[in-house]
Image (tube, grey):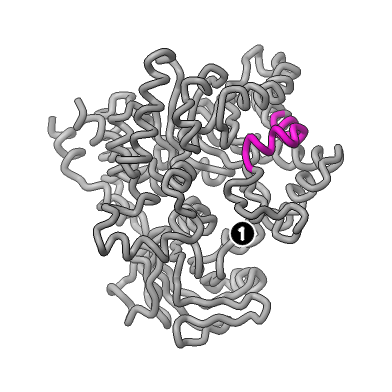
Amino acid sequence: MEQAEAVMGVSPIDIEHLLHAKMADGPSGPVAAHGVAASPGAASGRVCLSVDAVLDADDEGVPAVFVRPFTTPADEVAMSVAAAIITAKGGMASHAAVIARGWGIPAVVGVETLSVDVAAGAARLGETELRDGDPITVDGSAGTVMLGAAEVGAVEIPEELFTLLAWADELRGGRLAVRANADDAAAARLAREFGATGVGLCRTEHMFLGERLPLIQRAITDGGTTALDALAEAQVDDLVELLEAMDGLPVTVRLLDPPLHEFLPDHPELAEDNPMLGVRGARLGVLRPELYRAQAKAVVEAAARRTAAGGDPQVQIMVPLVVGGPELAHVRATVTDEVAGIKSRLGGRGVPVGAMIETPRSALAALEIALWADFLSVGTNDLTQMTFGFSRDDIEAKIMRPYMHHGLLEANPFETLDEVGVGRLVFDAVAAVRATQPETEIGVCGEHGGDPASIAFLAAAGVDYVSCSPHRIPVARLAAAQAVAGSA
């Protein structure tokens, strides 16, 4: 009873504060700009307006604050070593925000007063000119930017936290598992240290950073055997390491879902008027089946190598942006052909194939999709975007503050799940599948899986697990236990 009272008496927000750096003596000075608090924590460093500037600062051992109009996969080699990130555009579900949270990097995005001229290597924050090397401070928890340097305190996680989380897991009693969104072995290892019980989302397109970016670009634009073999080969090694880090626990590998404007910015022949609604996910698998075939081959080859090494890979393959059963059946055939050819090397075990529920139609057609899926995962980032008609890349900075100020929205729907619209779609989709296929596993892999209020709703909806960024795992474990106990 005392343990349960302790678990129920701690706020998940207090846990989040323990996990991230903050200013040693409070705010460093006057706030120069506000934006979307995209990834918590604080950092101080020198302004870097280019990838090369970040890499140079890293070589010198100097903290770099990467300042960009927005980020793309080509920037990830710099993002991975930056102390903090600031962008002029973007919201909670934009590229910069998702990557920063996954890597535990403080970030403020959607800073409307920031302008960055990449070609000229110049930037302005309001009336202030920013130059490479200028000192700047970022508070990703508050969504603020300060000019000048500040002292940032070190993160010290007390041992008592892990005791509390162990009690929380006991209270949860096996319900509402907490998995991680992890795209590489390092993130998976961190997630496991924080208590994740698997990987609910491995975004394979995020494996192609920096010098690897041409691999995915050639695979999409060329599609020849050489390009596809190079794509698969690069992923096998990464997946072997990821499966080893999560040995014995489920790992859900999502097939390519690359928005073409992010991965192919210099290919006008593939330009789309609305790329976030264009040739993505399953649509890419229908038009270019050889891409998904190559990826499926890489997944099962990685699992076979782990099996041969004495490991216990619990891998499953997920098809993104599905809109209906016939579409999933079509793409699934491409994937299962590759699995069948290597099944003997997996000890006779198959590889489950599931689907992401990310559009209003797929939520409404969840039962039809479930007929062809071994599991389902709700991608609440895109589902929110498409249900509201809000671009997750740029609407938050322009719309959210006035909407919140006037009481037009109770909360930012990219931070806390909208129960009236998006939540209704999730609730009804889960109920429809549970009524006829109760054994079908259903998870949630949007960042709402790390938000306490959203977790409480998802627990009531009856999902089997939530999946979030590694650094949000402790918060999700506590929130999940409180949600389960509160509904008992």
Image quadrant holding the N terminus, namely top left
Q: Position of residue 309 (x, y in %)?
A: 67, 25
Q: Start and end of the magenta stretch? A: 280-296
Q: Which residue is mark 1?
A: 72
Q: Residue at x 46, y 48 (%)?
A: 385
Q: Residue at x 35, y 40 (%)?
A: 421
Above or below, 454 against 89 in this view is above
Number of dots carrying numbers: 1
- Residue 131 among those drawn in magenta: no
Mostly what secondary structure, the magenta segment?
helix
Locate residue 393 relative to residue 218 in the image: left or right: left
Q: Name the element at disc 1.
A: loop
Above or below, 55 against 376 in this view is below
Q: Position of residue 81 (x, y in %)?
A: 57, 62
Image quadrant holding the C terminus, namely top left
Q: Position of residue 433 (x, y in %)?
A: 42, 20
Depth check, front residue: 468 or 432: 432
Q: Is residue 244 visible?
A: no
Q: Residue at x 55, y 32 (%)?
A: 323
Label 1: how many Cα within 10 Å (few below 14, some 14–19, many 20+): some
Locate residue 449 relative to residue 114 in the image: left or right: left
Depth check, front residue: 309 or 212: 212
Depth check, front residue: 250 or 324: 324
Q: Residue at x 75, y 58 (%)?
A: 268
Locate residue 195 relative to residue 315 in the image: left or right: left
Q: Amino acid at mark 1?
A: Thr
Q: Position of residue 299 (x, y in %)?
A: 67, 30
Q: Is residue 66 visible?
A: yes
